[in-house]
Amino acid sequence: MRRAWSLLTAAALAAAGFLAAGPPAAAADADLVRNGGFEAGLDGWNCSAGSGAAVTTPVHGGTTALRATPAGQDNARCSQTVTVKPDSAYTLGAWVQGAYVYLGASGTGTTDVSAWTQSPGSWKHLTTTFRTGPSTTSVTVHTHGWYGQPAHVTDDVTLVGPDPGGPGQPRPPAAPTGLTASATSSSSVLLTWTAVAGATSYTVHRDGAAPLPVTSASASVSGLAASTAYTFRVSAANAAGESPQSAPVSVTTSGGGGGGGGGGLPAHALVGYLHTSFANGSGYVRMADVPASWDVINLAFGEPTSVTSGDIRFRLCPVAECPNVESPAEFKAAVKAKQAAGKKVLISIGGQNGQVQLPTTAARDTFVSSVAAIIDEYGLDGLDIDFEGHSLSLATGDTDFRSPTTPGIVNLISAVKTLKARYGAGFVLTMAPETFFVQLGYQFYGSGPWGGQDPRAGAYLPVIHALRDDLTLLHVQDYNSGPIMGLDNQYHSMGGADFHIAMTDMLLTGFPVAGNTARVFPALRPDQVAIGLPATTNAGNGHTSPAEVTKALNCLTKKTDCGTYQTHGTWPGLRGLMTWSVNWDRFGGWEFSRNFDAYYGRTA
């Protein structure tokens, strides 16, 4: 009504001769949001962690709206960078459905603004205003939900104010073209595209993964699953904003086993620790007597001569403790027999009592030579890293898992890479960290930005990340653990299917470290992950009954029996289970291994 009145008034004044010629008019108000009604899907919008989708119901106007789903530490933020005029007033508005739905603008050059709704139900109109700063040429408008809340819907987003228009005004770059993809290995892809005029950076987008920022017209994407199809898009950006995403390109990674070779593992493998240097109350099991159910046998343990020496030693259990121990020659012959049957035998370093720290390059080099001597003497297939207690700790100020600076961490990574290079593609590398050193990193990392936290929190993450392309198998110990927060921001306690589901979902989905969405620990491939459990109640705290183990496997591989926890995917390629230990499983009548064989229809 108001606009109709103003037009009629202007016409009357012009007819009466009261409108005189003057200077050019200021820029007219316009709606500057591109695709605010989502009629073109998500064109022009970027949604965090693949959280957004265009839906046809419910809608406020037109035929399509945005539905965005928060998950874990991701609040489903969808944003668009818009070119604006400096020192100008703008009104931002949107229609939303859902609880705790936010609408806001950032980078205004003055005061960033937001509006939100508390209750779900019918459509609600959110609106807020701001004024741009004297040198502001772009702002980012965004909408998001809240942690732990269900999906919300947004439609008809508008930003009304002066149109910057005109020549010389900065504009976002055009969408990239010429995107191509080629698989460079079973776990990585190379992307290239035509450089865009005016672009200063690019972002690689893959559904379900965190955006990957790059500065040139190419990117190498790693940590992918073998023989799997992926779809990528790329956007370009400059100071004025971000372009629409490019046309998609799809590529399938090549076939292959676990990272770094690891050849010979079955699709679903059972891993067990063998008490080789001690009996531990469960009785000694000779290598030749280990049942065929066990695909990977970790020799427990190689231990250092002192905590910081790096000098690892291994010996068979003394006769006084293990009267039925075999001779070294018999043991070596049994190892060869297992390998001939397709099994892998590894030396496990550390354990509960074997604290290992590599604070110097001398300790690093001694570690390499002493571990290699054990592998060579017994003809083993590789290495299991079972650093516990105070073996790994992050120095104050070491806050980014992607580029660690703590000498003990850096030296360990270097030592393992040296061993990998020495033995080649067939070298099997596994790790058995505790939840404190991995999943706790979702909340806490090291001593924290201000100090005061336990410096061991999340300390395995830089090691896993740096070695992910060499890693055959990660089997976190889902036992002897306190409650750990999952991606649903709820605490989960050991002993039931729920704990294993939540902890494994974190490894297969990835998570922001210490809640920092700019530092996301990328998901591991499902063939790189096994669930670690105690074989019996005697073996450790957090024993899980066979029925609950089956529920966990059903949820993770079939998305059934999940209970209240909702996983972020389904992974039929999950590699399998690990247990402490072969000896304790025998003590328990082989209940653990028989349940695994029955689940996968194997005959030992």
Image (cartoon, grey):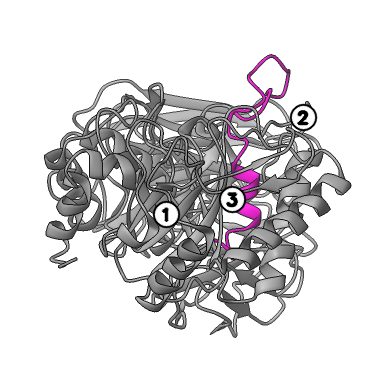
313 displayed left or right of 96: right
Q: Nearer the viewer, mark 1 or mark 2?
A: 2
591 displayed left or right of 163: left
Q: Position of residue 22 (x, y in %)?
A: 76, 49
Q: What element does badge 3 sit on?
A: helix
Q: Which residue is mark 2?
A: 395
**Three-letter residue code for mark 1:** Gly
Q: Earlier in the sequence, mark 2 or mark 3?
A: 2
Q: Which residue is mark 3?
A: 464
* Nearer to me, 505 or 258: 258
Q: Which residue is mark 1?
A: 50
* Nearer to me, 438 or 425: 425
Q: Check residue 456 for magenta coloring.
A: yes
Q: What element does badge 1 sit on?
A: helix
Which residue shows up at 58% across the image and 82% down it? 184
97 displayed left or right of 37: left
**Three-letter residue code for mark 2:** Ala
Residue 154 visible, this angle: no
Q: Earlier in the sequence, mark 1 or mark 3?
A: 1
CA separation, marks 2 and 3? 17 Å
The answer to whether mark 1 and mark 2 are in CB contact below 8 A is no
Span of residues in magenta:
445-471
CA separation, marks 1 and 2? 34 Å
Q: Quadrant of residue 290?
A: bottom left
